[in-house]
Image (cartoon, rainbow, N blue to C red):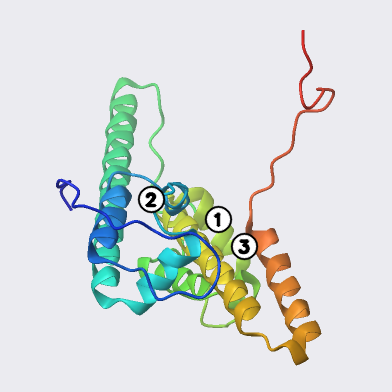
Amino acid sequence: MARAPSPPLPVIDHTGGHKLSQYHPNIGWEICQRMCDGLTIRQIAADPAMPSYATIFHWRRMHPDFAEMYDMCRDELAWKRQFETASRAKARALRREAEVAAGTRRRRPAGAGRKSTFTLAAAEAVCDRLADGEALSAICADPAMPSLKAVYTWLKRFPEFEAMYLAAREEQRMWLELKIEHVAGTTHWSALAEGKAQVARLQERLGRLTPKHYRPRGRVWPPGPY
């Protein structure tokens, strides 16, 4: 998707309370353009002129025209990552052949080692179920799916699978945030305790998916004057 001049954007109302959908095709187009420029959904949603993180995910489900643009951009980014991965793999293979020819590297015997179980179809099946909110342990417990050990081996050995996996985890986080927002907004006052417990469970799961950041030991935080 080539970068085109941005059309005028309607103003997004970020105040609370019930309101009609603020979706506009121009905003959808701008979101997809920024995605194709390499920005993440979190970076796009951080702009006050853009909708929130959960709203973007909601629009994708509710507006087919936006979903089509969004998926086209994701496909283009995925193709670009696959092309770059293939180019790096080809460069490594050429370098290995040059080292073998120069005598600085031994050629690996044909058939040596165990053949990998990785296939693109299996990788897509795992990532699709992850994006739908299913836990990785539950996916790997399915006899038709690869084992947990195989999935972690694929993450280390196949950069294309790592990119797919991270994108699926991002979509899973978006889905959980949208679900939390839905439960909090639709729970009746008579079932408030049950709604709070459900939100707490969802937030706990979302927390497990969020990367942890730790400050170095022995450093004063916040830093004082020197």
Q: What element carries label 3?
A: helix
Q: Mark 1 or mark 2: name the one nearer the start of the chain.
A: 2
Query: Label 3 vs label 1: CA separation?
Result: 6 Å
Q: Quadrant of the C terminus?
A: top right
Up the image or down, 122 lies above or below 46; here it is below
Q: Is mark 2 on a helix, strand or loop?
A: loop
State the CA–CA distance, disc 2 to disc 3: 43 Å
Q: Earlier in the sequence, mark 2 or mark 3?
A: 2
Q: Which residue is drawn at 32% across and 41% down?
A: 89
Residue 134 in view of the camera: no
Q: Residue 149 carries which label?
A: 3
Q: Residues within 10 Å of mark 1 (few under 14, many from 20)?
A: some
Q: Is residue 106 above or below residue 37?
A: above
Label drawn at residue 153: 1
Q: In which quarter of the image is residue 124?
A: bottom left
Mark 2 surroundings: few (<14), some (14-19) or many (≥20) residues within 10 A: some
* Amino acid on which disc 3 is placed: Lys
Q: Which residue lies furthest to the top in this view?
A: 226
Q: Position of residue 92 (x, y in %)?
A: 33, 35
Q: Are circles 3 and 1 on residues that touch, CB within 8 Å? A: yes
Three-letter amino acid code of the residue under disc 1:
Thr
Residue 175 at x, y percent in the picture: 52, 71
Q: Residue at x 26, y 49 (%)?
A: 80
Q: Position of residue 187 (x, y in %)?
A: 67, 85
Name the residue beneath numbered marker 2: 49
Q: Where is residue 121 in the image (x, y as percent from the top left)?
A: 37, 71
Kind of residue at badge 2: Ala
For marks 2 and 3, give the one nearer the viewer: 2
Residue ID at (65%, 76%): 184
- What separation in Å lies between label 1 and label 2 (alpha carbons)? 41 Å
